Amino acid sequence: MKKVISILLILFSALTYSQEVNKLFAEGNTFYKEENYSRAVGVYLAIEEQGMESDDLYFNIANCYYKMNKVAPAIYYYEKALKVNPANADASANLAFAKRMTIDVIEELPKTFLQRFSANIIQQLPFDTWAIIAVMASFLASLLFLLYYFSTSSTKKLFYFNTSIFAVFVLIVTVFFAFNNYKTVQKNKIAIIFSPKVEIMNAPSTSSDEIFELHEGTKVVVLDVLDNWKKIKIADGKTGWIYANALKEI
């Protein structure tokens, strides 16, 4: 009886929390429609502080910052929305507009076929989504194999055998995609420059030489961390060291 009461209390708490979040989200949307972007983003950020994570929430936060001409946080939250859901076309389109507000013009290095395949196919879904598809494929393969094993019709056996082989193939591919996606996310720690202007040094020291400078909104990859310094790489392949508080990891 105590377990049943505990489960009901948990379900009630979850329902209450969901209703509260939906109420806050609707309130933020109302402020946004009224073009009160500062109050809207305040409400959205309050939802984020409660541990809520969704591409719609991050997209709305980014839109508020974009309307307020705050380039760094706008790009930061568009990138967060795409991290949660790489297929969010609206976030991708608005991110392209937000990038036009940045000062730095960085020409990206040409990508190999495998890099393009990863970006256009594998990275279009989060690694946990690929993992879910892999689990579903494994159950389907098991079911089809059992149907093949117990079937008495030769036609059905052939059908179940072929479809189970296909399910196994899907399982292998999606497991590879999930692993590749996870590895890419862990390796490429993306960050956005938040300082209006920051010098990039050739070593993690104030006495080292400046090699180039970056401005707010520029996207970088964090390669290493040493004390209050982070080694970064930009799209054209240049690397250097930057103060950790000058950027924010996604």
Image: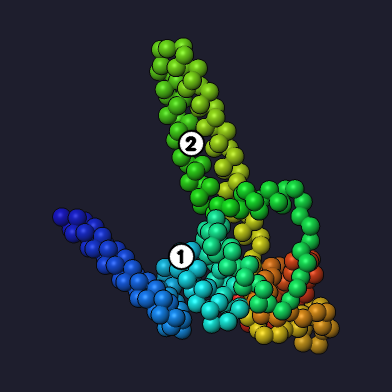
Q: Residue at x 44, y 17 (%)?
A: 156
Q: Which residue is mark 1?
A: 56
Q: Identify the residue at horizontal 21%, vertical 59% (top origin).
A: 8
Q: Left or right: where does residue 58 sit relative to residue 28?
A: right
Q: Residues within 10 Å of mark 2 (few under 14, many from 20)?
A: some
Q: Nearer the viewer, residue 169 or 196?
A: 196
Q: Is residue 163 left or right of residue 118?
A: left
Circle number at residue 146: none
Q: Which mark is residue 138?
A: 2
Name the residue at 58% across, 52% down. 124
Q: In this orientation, does residue 166 appear?
A: yes
Give the SS element for disc 2: helix
Q: Nearer the viewer, residue 110 or 188?
A: 110
What percent of the width, then of the height, locates residue 212?
A: 80, 79
Nearer-the-camera pick, 9 or 81: 81
Q: Is residue 150 above or below residue 67?
A: above
Local crowd size for mark 1, using a 10 Å CA cut-off: few (<14), some (14–19), many (≥20): some
Q: CA distance from mark 1 to mark 2?
A: 31 Å
